[in-house]
Amino acid sequence: MQFNVAPVSLTSDEPGPFVVWAGDDGYDTQAGYFSLLASSGIKGTLFLSVDWVDQPGTSPVYGDSYITTAQVAAIVSAGHEVATHGKNHEDLGNYYLTYGAAALDLLLGAAIGDIQSKFGFSVKTGSYPGGSANSRVKEIVSRRHEFFRCSRGVVSRNAPDPFDVPGIDILAPSQSAIEGYIDEAVANRSIVVLFHHGSIDSTQLTKVSNLISYASSAGCDQGNFYRAMSQRSKWLSTRALIDAQGNAFHPVVHTNELIVDRNDNIGDHYVLDLDESTNAPFMDATSGTPFEFRKDLLALGTFYVGRRRVFEDFATTNGSTTVSSGSAGFRADDVGISISGTGIPAATTIASIVSPTQATMSAAATASGTNAAVTLDRPLSLGVTAAGEMRLYNGLSIYGTQSQEVSFRRLESTLEGSISANQWINSGTAGVGGAMTIDSGTGGSYVTIKGFATRIRSEDDTLRLRLGAAKDGIDFGTAEDVTIERDGSGNLAANVSLKTDGDLIVGTAGNGLLVKEGSNACLGTATLVSGSATVATSAVTANSRILLTPQNLSGVGTPQPMAVSARVAGTSFTITSASASDTSTVGWMIVEPA
Protein backbone atom coordinates (compact mmCIF):
# COMPACT_ATOMS: atom_id res chain seq x y z
CA MET A 1 0.00 0.00 0.00
CA GLN A 2 1.28 3.46 -0.89
CA PHE A 3 -0.33 6.83 -0.12
CA ASN A 4 0.63 10.50 0.11
CA VAL A 5 0.50 12.57 3.31
CA ALA A 6 0.85 16.29 2.74
CA PRO A 7 1.37 18.89 5.53
CA VAL A 8 -1.29 21.52 6.02
CA SER A 9 -0.14 25.07 5.32
CA LEU A 10 -0.94 27.83 7.81
CA THR A 11 -3.33 30.14 5.99
CA SER A 12 -5.88 32.74 6.99
CA ASP A 13 -8.60 30.09 7.27
CA GLU A 14 -6.62 28.10 9.83
CA PRO A 15 -7.99 28.06 13.40
CA GLY A 16 -7.27 31.13 15.48
CA PRO A 17 -6.73 31.37 19.24
CA PHE A 18 -8.91 29.08 21.35
CA VAL A 19 -9.69 29.19 25.09
CA VAL A 20 -10.64 25.80 26.55
CA TRP A 21 -12.79 25.95 29.72
CA ALA A 22 -12.51 22.84 31.88
CA GLY A 23 -12.92 21.41 35.37
CA ASP A 24 -11.01 18.64 37.11
CA ASP A 25 -11.92 15.88 39.60
CA GLY A 26 -15.63 16.43 40.39
CA TYR A 27 -16.90 18.83 43.10
CA ASP A 28 -20.36 20.23 43.79
CA THR A 29 -19.28 23.86 43.24
CA GLN A 30 -18.42 22.95 39.64
CA ALA A 31 -22.15 22.72 38.89
CA GLY A 32 -22.41 26.51 39.09
CA TYR A 33 -19.21 26.91 37.06
CA PHE A 34 -20.52 24.81 34.17
CA SER A 35 -23.90 26.53 34.43
CA LEU A 36 -22.12 29.89 33.95
CA LEU A 37 -20.28 28.54 30.91
CA ALA A 38 -23.55 27.28 29.38
CA SER A 39 -25.28 30.64 29.98
CA SER A 40 -22.40 32.26 28.06
CA GLY A 41 -22.87 29.87 25.13
CA ILE A 42 -19.73 27.87 25.98
CA LYS A 43 -19.50 24.07 26.10
CA GLY A 44 -16.64 23.12 28.45
CA THR A 45 -14.97 19.85 29.51
CA LEU A 46 -15.36 18.06 32.85
CA PHE A 47 -12.32 15.82 33.46
CA LEU A 48 -14.12 13.48 35.85
CA SER A 49 -12.76 10.99 38.41
CA VAL A 50 -15.87 8.87 38.02
CA ASP A 51 -15.58 7.05 41.38
CA TRP A 52 -15.82 10.44 43.14
CA VAL A 53 -19.41 10.90 41.96
CA ASP A 54 -21.76 10.70 45.00
CA GLN A 55 -18.77 10.08 47.28
CA PRO A 56 -19.56 11.07 50.90
CA GLY A 57 -17.59 13.63 52.86
CA THR A 58 -15.73 16.70 51.62
CA SER A 59 -12.48 17.36 49.76
CA PRO A 60 -9.51 17.73 52.13
CA VAL A 61 -8.00 20.23 49.69
CA TYR A 62 -10.93 22.48 48.69
CA GLY A 63 -13.53 21.74 51.38
CA ASP A 64 -16.17 21.05 48.71
CA SER A 65 -18.64 18.20 48.73
CA TYR A 66 -18.21 15.78 45.84
CA ILE A 67 -20.27 16.08 42.68
CA THR A 68 -23.52 14.11 42.41
CA THR A 69 -24.96 11.96 39.67
CA ALA A 70 -27.70 14.54 39.10
CA GLN A 71 -25.15 17.36 38.73
CA VAL A 72 -23.06 15.43 36.20
CA ALA A 73 -26.21 14.50 34.26
CA ALA A 74 -27.18 18.19 34.14
CA ILE A 75 -23.67 19.08 32.86
CA VAL A 76 -24.00 16.47 30.10
CA SER A 77 -27.51 17.67 29.23
CA ALA A 78 -26.16 21.22 28.82
CA GLY A 79 -23.85 19.94 26.08
CA HIS A 80 -20.58 19.91 27.97
CA GLU A 81 -17.90 17.27 27.29
CA VAL A 82 -17.07 14.62 29.93
CA ALA A 83 -13.54 13.15 29.87
CA THR A 84 -11.56 10.71 32.03
CA HIS A 85 -9.40 11.79 34.97
CA GLY A 86 -8.50 8.36 36.29
CA LYS A 87 -11.18 6.23 37.89
CA ASN A 88 -10.46 7.16 41.50
CA HIS A 89 -7.97 9.96 40.72
CA GLU A 90 -5.09 7.45 40.43
CA ASP A 91 -1.63 8.75 39.52
CA LEU A 92 -1.34 6.97 36.17
CA GLY A 93 2.47 6.89 36.21
CA ASN A 94 2.62 5.23 39.62
CA TYR A 95 -0.26 2.92 38.72
CA TYR A 96 1.65 1.74 35.65
CA LEU A 97 4.86 1.15 37.64
CA THR A 98 2.97 -0.79 40.31
CA TYR A 99 0.55 -2.89 38.23
CA GLY A 100 1.88 -2.82 34.64
CA ALA A 101 0.63 -1.80 31.21
CA ALA A 102 -2.28 -4.24 30.94
CA ALA A 103 -3.72 -3.17 34.29
CA LEU A 104 -3.45 0.53 33.40
CA ASP A 105 -5.23 -0.10 30.10
CA LEU A 106 -8.03 -1.91 31.95
CA LEU A 107 -8.30 0.96 34.46
CA LEU A 108 -8.72 3.49 31.65
CA GLY A 109 -11.27 1.25 29.95
CA ALA A 110 -13.24 0.93 33.18
CA ALA A 111 -13.31 4.72 33.64
CA ILE A 112 -14.56 5.20 30.09
CA GLY A 113 -17.14 2.43 30.50
CA ASP A 114 -18.51 3.90 33.75
CA ILE A 115 -18.96 7.35 32.22
CA GLN A 116 -20.67 5.91 29.17
CA SER A 117 -22.98 3.62 31.16
CA LYS A 118 -23.92 6.19 33.83
CA PHE A 119 -24.21 9.35 31.70
CA GLY A 120 -24.48 8.13 28.11
CA PHE A 121 -21.43 10.14 27.02
CA SER A 122 -18.91 8.76 24.51
CA VAL A 123 -15.48 9.63 25.95
CA LYS A 124 -12.74 10.77 23.58
CA THR A 125 -10.30 12.71 25.78
CA GLY A 126 -8.81 12.69 29.25
CA SER A 127 -6.25 14.24 31.61
CA TYR A 128 -3.58 12.94 33.96
CA PRO A 129 -4.42 13.15 37.69
CA GLY A 130 -1.46 15.01 39.10
CA GLY A 131 -0.69 16.45 35.68
CA SER A 132 2.20 14.44 34.25
CA ALA A 133 3.12 11.02 32.84
CA ASN A 134 6.03 9.25 31.15
CA SER A 135 6.23 8.17 27.51
CA ARG A 136 5.06 4.63 28.25
CA VAL A 137 1.93 5.89 29.99
CA LYS A 138 1.23 8.26 27.09
CA GLU A 139 1.40 5.34 24.69
CA ILE A 140 -1.10 3.38 26.78
CA VAL A 141 -3.64 6.22 27.12
CA SER A 142 -3.42 6.80 23.34
CA ARG A 143 -5.03 3.39 22.77
CA ARG A 144 -8.40 4.58 24.15
CA HIS A 145 -8.28 8.39 23.76
CA GLU A 146 -7.71 10.85 20.94
CA PHE A 147 -6.22 13.64 23.10
CA PHE A 148 -4.93 13.92 26.67
CA ARG A 149 -4.24 16.95 28.87
CA CYS A 150 -1.45 17.45 31.41
CA SER A 151 -0.94 20.34 33.85
CA ARG A 152 2.11 22.55 33.41
CA GLY A 153 0.92 26.13 33.81
CA VAL A 154 1.79 27.22 30.26
CA VAL A 155 0.04 27.95 26.98
CA SER A 156 -0.07 25.09 24.47
CA ARG A 157 1.68 26.24 21.29
CA ASN A 158 -0.45 24.34 18.74
CA ALA A 159 -0.30 21.23 20.98
CA PRO A 160 2.62 19.43 19.28
CA ASP A 161 2.01 16.34 21.45
CA PRO A 162 -1.70 15.43 21.54
CA PHE A 163 -1.16 13.32 24.68
CA ASP A 164 0.73 15.96 26.65
CA VAL A 165 -1.29 19.16 26.18
CA PRO A 166 -0.53 21.66 28.99
CA GLY A 167 -3.15 23.64 30.90
CA ILE A 168 -3.43 26.32 33.61
CA ASP A 169 -5.20 25.99 36.97
CA ILE A 170 -7.06 29.30 37.31
CA LEU A 171 -7.98 29.18 41.02
CA ALA A 172 -4.92 31.04 42.34
CA PRO A 173 -3.65 33.34 39.52
CA SER A 174 -5.08 36.83 39.30
CA GLN A 175 -7.43 37.84 36.51
CA SER A 176 -4.69 39.98 34.92
CA ALA A 177 -2.24 37.06 34.98
CA ILE A 178 -4.73 34.81 33.19
CA GLU A 179 -5.44 37.58 30.67
CA GLY A 180 -1.70 37.45 29.90
CA TYR A 181 -2.05 33.77 29.02
CA ILE A 182 -4.97 34.59 26.73
CA ASP A 183 -2.88 37.32 25.06
CA GLU A 184 -0.13 34.74 24.44
CA ALA A 185 -2.64 32.39 22.80
CA VAL A 186 -3.83 35.24 20.58
CA ALA A 187 -0.28 36.14 19.56
CA ASN A 188 0.53 32.53 18.60
CA ARG A 189 -2.86 31.44 17.23
CA SER A 190 -2.76 28.63 19.78
CA ILE A 191 -4.99 27.17 22.48
CA VAL A 192 -4.90 27.92 26.19
CA VAL A 193 -6.54 25.37 28.50
CA LEU A 194 -8.02 27.01 31.64
CA PHE A 195 -9.34 24.60 34.27
CA HIS A 196 -10.92 24.87 37.73
CA HIS A 197 -10.95 22.45 40.64
CA GLY A 198 -13.01 23.29 43.73
CA SER A 199 -13.60 26.36 45.95
CA ILE A 200 -15.59 28.01 43.14
CA ASP A 201 -17.37 30.79 45.02
CA SER A 202 -19.02 33.98 43.75
CA THR A 203 -15.65 35.72 43.50
CA GLN A 204 -14.28 32.96 41.30
CA LEU A 205 -17.41 32.95 39.13
CA THR A 206 -17.06 36.70 38.63
CA LYS A 207 -13.44 36.21 37.58
CA VAL A 208 -14.46 33.50 35.10
CA SER A 209 -17.24 35.71 33.69
CA ASN A 210 -14.77 38.60 33.22
CA LEU A 211 -12.26 36.29 31.52
CA ILE A 212 -14.92 34.98 29.15
CA SER A 213 -15.66 38.56 28.13
CA TYR A 214 -11.95 39.34 27.77
CA ALA A 215 -11.34 36.29 25.55
CA SER A 216 -14.35 37.18 23.43
CA SER A 217 -13.12 40.75 22.93
CA ALA A 218 -9.69 39.37 21.94
CA GLY A 219 -11.27 37.30 19.16
CA CYS A 220 -10.81 33.90 20.80
CA ASP A 221 -12.96 30.90 20.06
CA GLN A 222 -14.08 29.26 23.32
CA GLY A 223 -15.26 25.75 24.07
CA ASN A 224 -14.28 22.24 25.10
CA PHE A 225 -10.98 20.39 24.86
CA TYR A 226 -11.97 17.97 22.10
CA ARG A 227 -13.22 20.72 19.75
CA ALA A 228 -10.08 22.80 20.28
CA MET A 229 -7.79 19.88 19.49
CA SER A 230 -9.90 18.66 16.57
CA GLN A 231 -9.80 22.11 14.94
CA ARG A 232 -6.03 21.86 14.91
CA SER A 233 -6.07 18.48 13.22
CA LYS A 234 -7.02 17.33 9.76
CA TRP A 235 -7.66 13.85 8.48
CA LEU A 236 -5.67 13.16 5.34
CA SER A 237 -5.54 9.83 3.47
CA THR A 238 -5.90 6.72 5.65
CA ARG A 239 -6.28 8.12 9.17
CA ALA A 240 -3.09 10.19 9.07
CA LEU A 241 -3.63 12.96 11.64
CA ILE A 242 -1.84 16.23 10.81
CA ASP A 243 -1.68 19.27 13.08
CA ALA A 244 -1.69 22.91 11.96
CA GLN A 245 2.12 23.01 11.82
CA GLY A 246 2.28 20.08 9.42
CA ASN A 247 3.34 17.54 12.06
CA ALA A 248 1.85 14.07 11.69
CA PHE A 249 0.84 12.51 15.01
CA HIS A 250 -1.03 9.45 16.26
CA PRO A 251 -1.48 7.95 12.78
CA VAL A 252 -3.29 4.64 12.45
CA VAL A 253 -2.39 2.82 9.23
CA HIS A 254 -3.91 -0.55 8.37
CA THR A 255 -1.60 -2.10 5.77
CA ASN A 256 0.91 -4.91 5.28
CA GLU A 257 3.69 -2.54 4.30
CA LEU A 258 4.19 1.24 4.54
CA ILE A 259 6.28 2.98 1.87
CA VAL A 260 7.50 6.47 2.78
CA ASP A 261 8.46 8.51 -0.29
CA ARG A 262 10.22 11.89 -0.19
CA ASN A 263 8.23 13.11 -3.25
CA ASP A 264 10.79 15.81 -4.09
CA ASN A 265 13.73 16.26 -6.44
CA ILE A 266 15.93 14.12 -4.17
CA GLY A 267 13.52 11.20 -4.26
CA ASP A 268 14.13 7.79 -2.64
CA HIS A 269 12.02 5.99 -0.07
CA TYR A 270 12.12 3.37 2.65
CA VAL A 271 9.78 0.56 3.61
CA LEU A 272 8.39 0.01 7.12
CA ASP A 273 7.13 -3.46 8.03
CA LEU A 274 5.91 -5.15 11.19
CA ASP A 275 6.82 -8.74 11.98
CA GLU A 276 3.64 -10.81 11.58
CA SER A 277 4.21 -12.84 14.75
CA THR A 278 5.86 -10.33 17.11
CA ASN A 279 4.83 -6.91 15.73
CA ALA A 280 8.53 -5.97 15.80
CA PRO A 281 9.31 -3.08 13.40
CA PHE A 282 12.00 -3.37 10.75
CA MET A 283 12.94 -1.15 7.81
CA ASP A 284 14.45 -1.62 4.36
CA ALA A 285 16.17 1.26 2.58
CA THR A 286 16.53 1.50 -1.19
CA SER A 287 19.56 3.78 -1.30
CA GLY A 288 21.80 2.03 1.26
CA THR A 289 21.86 5.08 3.52
CA PRO A 290 21.50 4.75 7.30
CA PHE A 291 18.09 5.12 8.90
CA GLU A 292 17.90 8.26 10.96
CA PHE A 293 15.24 8.76 13.63
CA ARG A 294 14.98 12.49 14.27
CA LYS A 295 12.56 11.95 17.14
CA ASP A 296 12.33 9.32 19.86
CA LEU A 297 11.92 5.75 18.65
CA LEU A 298 9.49 3.72 20.77
CA ALA A 299 9.85 -0.03 20.17
CA LEU A 300 7.60 -2.23 22.29
CA GLY A 301 8.81 -5.42 20.65
CA THR A 302 12.24 -6.48 19.45
CA PHE A 303 13.96 -4.00 17.14
CA TYR A 304 15.76 -5.70 14.25
CA VAL A 305 18.73 -4.10 12.50
CA GLY A 306 20.25 -5.22 9.19
CA ARG A 307 20.19 -8.84 8.14
CA ARG A 308 17.82 -11.50 9.36
CA ARG A 309 19.17 -14.38 11.37
CA VAL A 310 21.02 -17.54 10.49
CA PHE A 311 19.18 -20.85 10.94
CA GLU A 312 20.95 -24.17 11.40
CA ASP A 313 18.18 -26.72 10.77
CA PHE A 314 17.58 -26.35 7.02
CA ALA A 315 17.02 -29.43 4.85
CA THR A 316 17.86 -29.31 1.13
CA THR A 317 17.54 -31.91 -1.64
CA ASN A 318 19.89 -32.00 -4.63
CA GLY A 319 18.01 -30.85 -7.75
CA SER A 320 14.97 -29.62 -5.80
CA THR A 321 13.87 -26.02 -5.14
CA THR A 322 12.09 -27.01 -1.92
CA VAL A 323 13.73 -26.21 1.42
CA SER A 324 12.39 -26.80 4.93
CA SER A 325 13.17 -25.58 8.44
CA GLY A 326 11.41 -26.10 11.75
CA SER A 327 12.57 -22.77 13.18
CA ALA A 328 12.66 -20.29 10.26
CA GLY A 329 8.94 -19.48 10.43
CA PHE A 330 8.58 -18.58 6.73
CA ARG A 331 6.31 -15.57 6.13
CA ALA A 332 4.64 -14.02 3.11
CA ASP A 333 7.05 -11.10 3.08
CA ASP A 334 10.03 -13.48 2.81
CA VAL A 335 9.30 -13.79 -0.93
CA GLY A 336 12.10 -12.06 -2.84
CA ILE A 337 14.72 -12.02 -0.08
CA SER A 338 18.03 -13.78 -0.62
CA ILE A 339 18.80 -17.23 0.76
CA SER A 340 22.35 -18.56 0.99
CA GLY A 341 24.14 -21.57 2.44
CA THR A 342 25.70 -24.93 1.64
CA GLY A 343 24.27 -26.41 -1.56
CA ILE A 344 22.36 -23.23 -2.49
CA PRO A 345 23.50 -21.43 -5.69
CA ALA A 346 24.60 -17.81 -5.52
CA ALA A 347 21.96 -15.08 -5.98
CA THR A 348 19.15 -17.47 -5.00
CA THR A 349 15.99 -15.92 -3.52
CA ILE A 350 12.79 -17.18 -1.89
CA ALA A 351 10.29 -17.70 -4.73
CA SER A 352 7.19 -18.69 -2.74
CA ILE A 353 6.01 -19.78 0.70
CA VAL A 354 4.43 -23.23 1.09
CA SER A 355 3.97 -23.14 4.86
CA PRO A 356 5.73 -21.71 7.94
CA THR A 357 8.18 -24.63 7.73
CA GLN A 358 8.60 -24.95 3.95
CA ALA A 359 9.46 -22.65 1.02
CA THR A 360 10.57 -22.85 -2.60
CA MET A 361 13.71 -21.20 -3.99
CA SER A 362 14.35 -19.48 -7.31
CA ALA A 363 17.08 -22.07 -8.08
CA ALA A 364 17.45 -25.77 -7.28
CA ALA A 365 19.84 -26.96 -4.58
CA THR A 366 23.14 -28.45 -5.77
CA ALA A 367 23.52 -30.77 -2.79
CA SER A 368 21.38 -32.60 -0.26
CA GLY A 369 21.78 -31.84 3.40
CA THR A 370 20.15 -31.80 6.84
CA ASN A 371 20.76 -29.37 9.71
CA ALA A 372 22.47 -27.04 7.25
CA ALA A 373 23.30 -23.42 8.22
CA VAL A 374 21.31 -21.08 5.98
CA THR A 375 21.04 -17.27 6.05
CA LEU A 376 17.85 -15.42 5.13
CA ASP A 377 18.88 -11.85 4.29
CA ARG A 378 17.12 -8.56 4.13
CA PRO A 379 18.92 -5.62 2.45
CA LEU A 380 21.84 -4.69 4.66
CA SER A 381 21.52 -1.36 6.47
CA LEU A 382 24.63 0.76 6.96
CA GLY A 383 23.45 1.67 10.43
CA VAL A 384 20.75 3.23 12.55
CA THR A 385 21.15 6.78 13.87
CA ALA A 386 18.82 8.10 16.57
CA ALA A 387 18.94 11.81 17.31
CA GLY A 388 16.48 11.24 20.13
CA GLU A 389 16.13 8.40 22.60
CA MET A 390 15.58 4.80 21.50
CA ARG A 391 13.29 3.13 24.03
CA LEU A 392 13.51 -0.64 23.55
CA TYR A 393 11.00 -2.19 25.93
CA ASN A 394 11.83 -5.71 24.77
CA GLY A 395 15.33 -5.91 23.35
CA LEU A 396 17.78 -5.07 20.58
CA SER A 397 18.74 -7.96 18.30
CA ILE A 398 21.54 -7.65 15.76
CA TYR A 399 21.67 -10.34 13.09
CA GLY A 400 24.20 -11.00 10.36
CA THR A 401 27.36 -12.87 9.45
CA GLN A 402 29.38 -9.68 9.07
CA SER A 403 31.00 -7.80 11.94
CA GLN A 404 28.44 -5.69 13.81
CA GLU A 405 28.86 -2.66 16.04
CA VAL A 406 26.63 -0.98 18.61
CA SER A 407 27.61 2.42 20.05
CA PHE A 408 25.80 4.09 22.96
CA ARG A 409 26.13 7.65 24.22
CA ARG A 410 23.98 6.74 27.21
CA LEU A 411 22.81 3.27 28.11
CA GLU A 412 20.35 2.50 30.88
CA SER A 413 17.84 -0.17 31.83
CA THR A 414 14.14 0.33 32.53
CA LEU A 415 11.46 -1.61 34.35
CA GLU A 416 10.26 -2.86 30.98
CA GLY A 417 13.51 -4.56 29.96
CA SER A 418 17.21 -4.93 30.57
CA ILE A 419 20.49 -5.74 28.89
CA SER A 420 20.75 -9.46 29.40
CA ALA A 421 23.43 -12.11 28.94
CA ASN A 422 20.75 -14.46 27.64
CA GLN A 423 21.04 -13.42 24.01
CA TRP A 424 23.84 -11.18 22.76
CA ILE A 425 24.07 -12.29 19.13
CA ASN A 426 26.69 -11.57 16.48
CA SER A 427 26.95 -14.76 14.42
CA GLY A 428 23.19 -15.23 14.24
CA THR A 429 22.94 -18.26 16.53
CA ALA A 430 20.32 -17.76 19.20
CA GLY A 431 20.52 -19.02 22.75
CA VAL A 432 18.70 -18.86 26.07
CA GLY A 433 20.73 -18.57 29.25
CA GLY A 434 24.38 -19.49 29.50
CA ALA A 435 27.40 -17.21 29.42
CA MET A 436 27.84 -14.12 27.28
CA THR A 437 31.04 -14.37 25.25
CA ILE A 438 32.97 -11.40 23.93
CA ASP A 439 35.39 -12.71 21.28
CA SER A 440 37.89 -10.19 19.88
CA GLY A 441 39.19 -12.70 17.36
CA THR A 442 42.85 -13.27 16.49
CA GLY A 443 45.70 -11.23 15.11
CA GLY A 444 46.27 -8.99 18.12
CA SER A 445 42.79 -7.39 18.23
CA TYR A 446 41.36 -6.01 21.46
CA VAL A 447 38.01 -5.61 23.16
CA THR A 448 37.61 -1.95 24.15
CA ILE A 449 35.02 -0.90 26.75
CA LYS A 450 34.66 2.86 27.16
CA GLY A 451 32.92 4.32 30.18
CA PHE A 452 33.37 6.39 33.31
CA ALA A 453 33.18 3.14 35.25
CA THR A 454 32.48 -0.52 34.48
CA ARG A 455 30.72 -2.38 37.26
CA ILE A 456 30.56 -6.17 37.51
CA ARG A 457 27.92 -7.67 39.79
CA SER A 458 27.15 -11.22 40.84
CA GLU A 459 23.75 -12.82 40.18
CA ASP A 460 22.44 -11.57 43.55
CA ASP A 461 23.25 -7.99 42.40
CA THR A 462 26.18 -7.60 44.81
CA LEU A 463 28.88 -5.35 43.40
CA ARG A 464 32.06 -7.40 43.01
CA LEU A 465 34.32 -5.30 40.81
CA ARG A 466 34.51 -1.78 39.43
CA LEU A 467 37.00 -0.65 36.82
CA GLY A 468 37.93 2.97 36.28
CA ALA A 469 35.81 5.84 37.64
CA ALA A 470 37.72 8.58 39.47
CA LYS A 471 41.02 6.64 39.44
CA ASP A 472 42.96 4.50 37.00
CA GLY A 473 42.42 1.33 38.98
CA ILE A 474 40.09 -1.39 40.28
CA ASP A 475 37.56 -1.30 43.12
CA PHE A 476 36.44 -4.48 44.90
CA GLY A 477 33.40 -4.89 47.11
CA THR A 478 30.00 -3.34 47.68
CA ALA A 479 31.35 -0.29 49.48
CA GLU A 480 33.87 0.37 46.68
CA ASP A 481 36.49 1.01 49.37
CA VAL A 482 39.08 -1.59 48.32
CA THR A 483 41.26 -0.49 45.45
CA ILE A 484 44.22 -1.47 43.31
CA GLU A 485 45.52 1.32 41.13
CA ARG A 486 48.59 2.70 39.42
CA ASP A 487 50.03 5.67 41.29
CA GLY A 488 51.75 8.71 39.80
CA SER A 489 55.14 6.92 39.75
CA GLY A 490 53.86 3.90 37.83
CA ASN A 491 53.66 1.64 40.88
CA LEU A 492 50.80 -0.80 41.50
CA ALA A 493 49.21 0.51 44.70
CA ALA A 494 46.62 -1.15 46.97
CA ASN A 495 44.89 0.28 50.05
CA VAL A 496 44.50 -3.14 51.79
CA SER A 497 46.71 -6.15 52.51
CA LEU A 498 47.73 -8.43 49.67
CA LYS A 499 47.57 -12.17 50.47
CA THR A 500 49.20 -14.97 48.50
CA ASP A 501 49.29 -18.72 49.10
CA GLY A 502 52.48 -18.93 47.04
CA ASP A 503 55.88 -17.28 47.26
CA LEU A 504 56.52 -13.59 46.85
CA ILE A 505 59.28 -13.53 44.24
CA VAL A 506 61.43 -10.56 43.24
CA GLY A 507 62.70 -11.74 39.90
CA THR A 508 65.23 -9.02 39.05
CA ALA A 509 68.56 -8.54 40.84
CA GLY A 510 68.76 -5.12 42.43
CA ASN A 511 65.07 -5.02 43.34
CA GLY A 512 63.90 -5.83 46.83
CA LEU A 513 61.49 -5.09 49.67
CA LEU A 514 60.67 -1.44 50.40
CA VAL A 515 58.92 -0.61 53.70
CA LYS A 516 57.77 2.86 54.70
CA GLU A 517 59.33 4.31 57.88
CA GLY A 518 57.82 6.93 60.17
CA SER A 519 55.47 7.20 63.12
CA ASN A 520 54.00 3.87 64.26
CA ALA A 521 55.89 2.06 61.51
CA CYS A 522 57.11 -1.53 61.21
CA LEU A 523 60.65 -0.47 60.21
CA GLY A 524 63.07 2.08 61.61
CA THR A 525 66.27 2.82 63.56
CA ALA A 526 66.97 3.61 67.21
CA THR A 527 70.10 5.04 68.91
CA LEU A 528 71.11 3.36 72.18
CA VAL A 529 71.71 5.48 75.23
CA SER A 530 73.73 3.71 77.97
CA GLY A 531 73.04 0.43 76.14
CA SER A 532 69.25 0.85 75.86
CA ALA A 533 66.51 2.46 73.70
CA THR A 534 62.72 2.40 73.78
CA VAL A 535 60.98 2.48 70.37
CA ALA A 536 57.45 3.96 70.31
CA THR A 537 55.21 2.31 67.67
CA SER A 538 51.61 1.13 67.71
CA ALA A 539 52.56 -1.60 65.22
CA VAL A 540 54.08 -3.86 67.89
CA THR A 541 51.94 -6.75 69.12
CA ALA A 542 52.39 -9.46 71.75
CA ASN A 543 53.32 -11.90 68.94
CA SER A 544 55.56 -9.61 66.86
CA ARG A 545 58.89 -11.00 65.64
CA ILE A 546 61.27 -8.03 66.07
CA LEU A 547 64.52 -8.23 64.05
CA LEU A 548 67.52 -6.18 65.34
CA THR A 549 70.69 -5.29 63.40
CA PRO A 550 73.46 -2.77 64.46
CA GLN A 551 73.92 -0.15 61.77
CA ASN A 552 77.24 1.14 63.26
CA LEU A 553 79.44 0.78 66.35
CA SER A 554 79.53 3.51 68.93
CA GLY A 555 80.79 3.30 72.55
CA VAL A 556 82.00 -0.28 72.05
CA GLY A 557 84.84 -1.79 70.04
CA THR A 558 83.04 -4.91 68.95
CA PRO A 559 79.37 -5.74 68.21
CA GLN A 560 77.51 -6.57 71.38
CA PRO A 561 74.67 -9.05 71.84
CA MET A 562 71.30 -7.29 72.09
CA ALA A 563 67.69 -8.27 72.58
CA VAL A 564 64.14 -7.02 73.01
CA SER A 565 64.01 -6.74 76.78
CA ALA A 566 60.42 -5.48 77.08
CA ARG A 567 57.36 -4.69 75.00
CA VAL A 568 53.96 -3.08 75.49
CA ALA A 569 51.58 -4.27 72.73
CA GLY A 570 50.27 -1.37 70.63
CA THR A 571 52.68 1.10 72.33
CA SER A 572 56.43 0.33 72.35
CA PHE A 573 59.28 -2.14 72.76
CA THR A 574 62.73 -1.80 74.45
CA ILE A 575 66.14 -2.75 72.97
CA THR A 576 68.93 -3.62 75.49
CA SER A 577 72.60 -4.21 74.65
CA ALA A 578 74.96 -6.46 76.65
CA SER A 579 77.18 -3.39 77.26
CA ALA A 580 75.92 -0.37 79.19
CA SER A 581 78.40 1.81 77.24
CA ASP A 582 76.86 0.82 73.86
CA THR A 583 75.55 3.90 71.94
CA SER A 584 75.30 2.25 68.52
CA THR A 585 72.46 2.86 66.02
CA VAL A 586 70.27 -0.24 65.71
CA GLY A 587 68.01 -1.06 62.77
CA TRP A 588 64.78 -2.85 63.65
CA MET A 589 61.92 -4.53 61.74
CA ILE A 590 58.61 -5.93 62.98
CA VAL A 591 57.22 -8.99 61.18
CA GLU A 592 53.94 -10.66 62.17
CA PRO A 593 53.36 -14.40 61.91
CA ALA A 594 50.65 -15.28 59.35
Image (cartoon, rainbow, N blue to C red):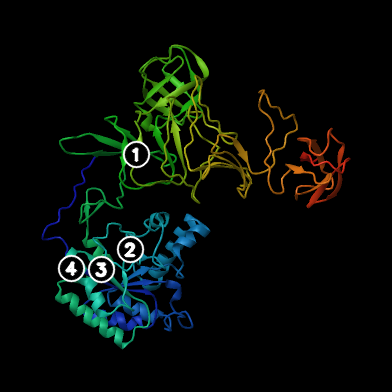
| Between marks 4 and 2 in the image, the one whose residue lies nearer the viewer | 4
Residue 545 image-quadrant placement:
top right
CA–CA distance in space, label 4 to label 1:
38 Å
Q: Of the residues under marks 1 and 2, which one precedes in the sequence?
A: 2
| Residue 1 visible in the picture | no
Residue 1 at x, y percent in the picture: 27, 39
Q: Vertical placement of 22 versus 320: above or below?
A: below
Circle 2 SS class: loop
Which residue corresponds to mark 2? 124
Which residue corresponds to mark 4? 186
Label 2 neighbour load within 10 Å: few <14, some 14-19, many 20+? some
Circle 1 SS class: strand
Residue 502 image-quadrant placement:
top right
Q: Are marks 4 and 1 in contact (CB under 8 Å)?
A: no
Which residue corresponds to mark 3? 192
CA–CA distance in space, label 1 to label 2:
35 Å
| Between marks 1 and 3 in the image, the one whose residue lies nearer the viewer | 1
CA–CA distance in space, label 3 to label 4:
9 Å
Which residue corresponds to mark 1? 385
Circle 3 SS class: strand
CA–CA distance in space, label 1 to label 3:
36 Å
Q: Are marks 4 and 2 in contact (CB under 8 Å)?
A: no
Label 4 neighbour load within 10 Å: few <14, some 14-19, many 20+? many
Q: Vertical placement of 208 versus 549: above or below?
A: below
In-front residue for pair 587/267? 587
Label 1 neighbour load within 10 Å: few <14, some 14-19, many 20+? few
Which amino acid does the dot numbered 3 rest on? Val
